[in-house]
Amino acid sequence: NPKVEETRMRTSWTMMTMRTMRAQRTRKTRLDVRMRVSSNPKVEEIPLKNIRRPLGRTRSNDATKVAWLMESIAEVGLQVPIDVLEVDGVYYGFSGCHRFEAHQNLGLETIKCNVRKATRKTLEMHLR
């Protein structure tokens, strides 16, 4: 039936257009967020007590991995800094949970961080 085929083609075209528009909005949003975060992080030693971990209570860390990291950090130090966002002078950590906990368990006061300056909007995106 030609009318059914024409309706299918229109529906298909509409769906493709909607997907394309959604993808463009997503890319634009990601680009906007990237532009609001400094692309050249600087490595700093930051006191553990100064780093807020808003997602830290959402899951527990693998105890075996934390123990292995504690041993490694005690022997050779932290090899890969954790990533933190600096928003209005406050540090927020969203990754490096096992390394962070290993430092706490070792009684270390500071941790090496890749610090990226970010906007409040970027922080809100991470908290969703």
Image: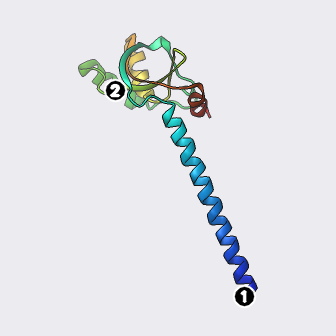
Q: Position of residue 121 (x, y in %)?
A: 60, 29
Q: Quadrant of the N terminus?
A: bottom right
- How many numbered callouts? 2
**Disc 2 on helix, strand or loop?**
helix
**Disc 1 on helix, strand or loop?**
helix
Colouring = rainbow
- Of the pair 40 and 63, the residue shown nearer to us: 40
| Residue bearing mark 1 | 2
Dot 2, how many residues are within 10 Å of its Cα: few (below 14), some (14-19), or many (20+)?
Answer: many
Q: Which mark is residue 32?
A: none
Q: Position of residue 96 (x, y in %)?
A: 42, 28
> Which mark's residue is nearer the viewer, 2 or 1?
1
- Taking 35 as reference, is 106 left or right? left
Q: Amino acid at mark 1?
A: Pro
- Taking 67 as reference, is 116 left or right? right
Q: Amino acid at mark 2?
A: Leu
Residue at left offset 65%, top offset 60%: 18
- Of the pair 97 and 46, the residue shown nearer to us: 46
Figure quadrant of residue 74: top left
| Residue bearing mark 2 | 69
User: Is residue 12 positioned above or below 95 on the image?
Assistant: below
